[in-house]
Amino acid sequence: MTLVKTSYDRRSFLKITSLTGGGLMIGFNWLVSCQSKPEAVLTMPKEWFKVTGFLKIGENGVVTIMSPNPEIGQNVKTSMPMIIAEELDVDWKNVIVEQAPLNTAIFTRQLAGGSQSIRQGWEGLRMAGAAARQMLKEAAAKAWNVPVDEITTEAGYLTHAGSGQKAGFGEMASAAAQLEIPKEVKLKEKNDFKIIGTSRKNVDGLKIVTGKPLYGLDYKREGMVYAMVAHPPAFGLKLKSYDASAAKSMPGIKDVFTIETYTAETSKNAFDATSFTELVVVAGNSTWEVLNAKKALNLEWEQIEDYVDVFSGYAPGTKIERNMPAGSESTSSHKALMAAHGTKPGKVVRKDGNPEAAFKKAAKIIERTYTAPFLAHNTMEPMNFFAHVTADKAELVGPIQTPEFLEQTISSRLGLPLEKIDIQMTRMGGGFGRRLYGHFGVEAAVISQKLNAPVKLVYTRESDMSYGIYRPSYHAYYRAGLDKDGNLIAFHVRAGGIPESPLAENRFPAGAVDNYLAESWAIDSNISIGAFRAPRSNFIAGAEQSFLDEVAEAAGKDPIQFRLDLMNRAKTNPIGENNDYDAARYAGVLELVREKSDWDKRDKKGRGVAAYFCHNSYVAHVLDLEMESGKPVVKNVTCAVDCGIVVNPIAATNLTEGGIVDGIGCALYGNLTFSEGKPEQNNFDSYRLIRHSEAPKNIDVHFVKSDVDPTGLGEPPFPPIMGALANALYNATGKRYYDQPLIGSQQILG
Amino acid sequence: MATFNLNINGKTHQVEADPATPMLWVLRDHLNMVGTKFGCGIAACGACTIHLGDMAMRSCQLPVSQVGNMPVTTIEGLSENGDHPVQKAWLEIDVPQCGYCQAGQIMNASALLKANTNPSDEEIEAAMNGNICRCGTYTRIKKAIKTAAAEINGAA
């Protein structure tokens, strides 16, 4: 039995309120780590004591859970309430799940990103459910005049066996609301779970399949003006002048004007990516009219000058500075620059042993280089936001992964206090990191302020894809030294990119090789970038896992056994400090995928394996493909995942399948190129996303049985599939593939 | 501007619009039927799929002036209570992740099953290839189409 404290230092993690119509409401913080050591509490941020979610029990017994986190398709709107319902002991059928609004007075720090929602929410959600159950039991004990410990709960009912008393939660809810919050509560034993670990379908499923208005783009308000923005066609350009006379005279057009998303005075945070300083706005009565008028704009552009963009960092008082060089960049020049950096020493970020001496002694040295292009997020719902700004308040509605950060920026940009800004979150038509960057929300607010009207800002697909905030372009050079027995005695990685390095120097195989060298470099660029599903891992995993496959082959070893031997070394006798993975769990997913894919028994033709650790979870894939007319057809993917306790298996499996499909698509086809600063792809006719016929014919997902608290899942299955794919391509064609997109415009492989 | 009498989901709707306006925006902006989604505007993603008669059409490329008397069905009108075999199968298989593309996927799949009640894997892939799902739910969509086909065939 786990006992957890509900308060520290006279501050409580839980807030109780009685409901006007009768019933109980408990506010809780989903970020709370209730098993923290007392000494850690002293440094706990104040925000941990702020309410971020609610649990309501009405007198009719219906439980409403306000899910605190934005829903981007990772299914937290179902999974997070499941955790509360488990500890509360209610029938899932009587639970209603609502998206909690962002209300600055009570909600804080709602953020979907980094696969952290369930991991961080786990303890706080459990505590809230357990506290409510305890209070209901106490209310029943008082009413029935029996000892509280003799009362049991099941499926929304309180029972006292001795006296034969029984009551629904709803009957005791109002009385429970009058009680003090218990100082500590008991959490369930993990093997007593009845809801966690069982499959529960998407709570919004029926609304989705019947076309109900759920998404930001669906939101409407009487008298709403539609707006679109025009931005420079190329990075490195800014607006010089514009002539809107033709556009302004078109039917349904209200106004054409320019805005600055951020002014020099705006205090920007890490999620205020700036691609362009000034935008031209077209506002009118309908999307179609605005779309046509936008095409009639006469716009002139000029070159930007060098500047430094400054943002506040995650930690208070810190700053992030980004150099934005003038000039028009092209993919061809990017490739040449990256190739040049790849051959000269970078900044040494980790060194174990004596790599150079070991390489001199090596019987065999393997050197390979891997590259990947910029990628666009391409959420199916284009960027959009609703804003209604008046003299004394701002009301915003839309799809955003970082509402609290957006609120801060809007406060600074409009000069309104935080409590006068209300942001409602809608369901999101995909995120993948793109909606962490809320410039579109700021734009909508500035446009609404200027028009003094409610405004819906809509990006066309072309604007969405050419605005920037891309996955950076990356480059990694690897070198491995083997002794005469095929043992890996030296390992060197030198990785960089435009404008950031993808290197994670403390990840495997760091810790498993005596002589290890990791170097990093980066090239400034005026092309804006942002987090993209599994940032940095989304390239370096595929590169590293392709390279290790080739090294294993050179060593004459089975690729899974080769990795397992290294992990065993990292487990029993690790090299160096700060190794950022648990070698036993890492090996666990490889062993599971080896078993489930019949690895040892089956022919390796067209088979590839890869494993990776990121966002606190471990994933291994075996991918089987066949070449048909020079094209790879993925027949099967066997996947093993260790993400701790799986809260909702059907949703976890779906998310894993999605990461696999997405990863195969990005690796084979994803490619955003530039000519003179201009993105050369701006819609789905030129930017290729994976389609039905290209998806794997079958995917088998297996979870490692675990009682470790849950870790991330939105991102971890995505990076390693790229390595498994590249390795399978080699085993099918006899040729190694080093540069993404692996197919791109080239149709025939082999 | 011109006046159009449109037969949508069994009801007549009168709309004043520029004749070139795509049905996508007539549905979304004029009639507040927002189940039909905007994805690309160039008929390259399938999010805006509706039925014109029994045919799946990309509404972003269908000018309102070309609809005439043809009956239009949108996701809102596919069934009264969300119980079309395709919708039921989508819930049964728990297909959606973000869900944004799913209305278009469902409209395309239901048109496919009207034309071919027992499609093979290859026929499903060919018919569905114009509908992009960025979340990658393709394997579940295929399973759901087969589940729906089984129900349709079982009931026949």
Image (cartoon, coloured by chain):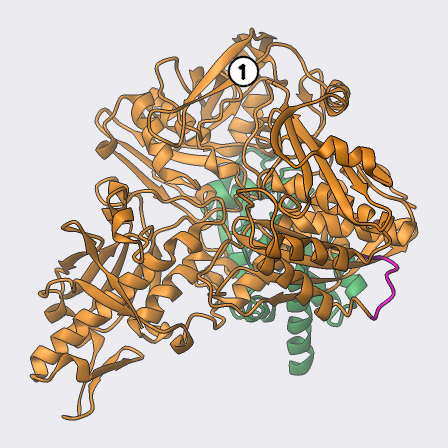
In front: A457, or A311? A311
Give the residue drawn at x 18%, y 81%.
Answer: A149
Residue that mark 1 sits on: A323
Confirm whether residue A689 shows in the render: no
Which span of residues is magenta-colored?
A: A601-607
Q: Secondary structure at mark 1?
A: strand
Q: Colour of chain A?
A: orange
Instruction: Please give left or right for residue B98 compared with residue A131 in the image.
Output: right
In front: A721, or A220? A721
Place residue A636 in its image quadrant: bottom right
Residue A549 horizontal/vertical position (percent):
79, 49
The answer to if A606 sits in the magenta stretch is yes
In front: B22, or B12? B22
The answer to if B10 sits in the magenta stretch is no
Instruction: Please give left or right for residue A453 compared with residue B21 in the image.
Output: left
Q: Is residue A156 above or below residue A746?
A: below
Q: Residues within 10 Å of mark 1 (few under 14, many from 20)?
A: some
Q: Is residue A87 above or below residue A227?
A: below
Give the residue drawn at x 47%, y 44%.
Answer: A113
Say what amino acid the circle numbered 1 marks.
Asn
Q: Colour of chain B?
A: green
Place residue A54 in its image quadrant: bottom left
Place residue A170 in its image quadrant: bottom left
Q: Label 1 lies in what chain?
A: A
Total tally of numbered discs in the picture = 1
Instruction: Please give left or right for residue A183 compared with residue A518 in the image.
Output: left
Residue A36 horizontal/vertical position (percent):
31, 54
Q: Is residue B7 above or below residue A666?
A: below
Residue A308 horizontal/vertical position (percent):
49, 13
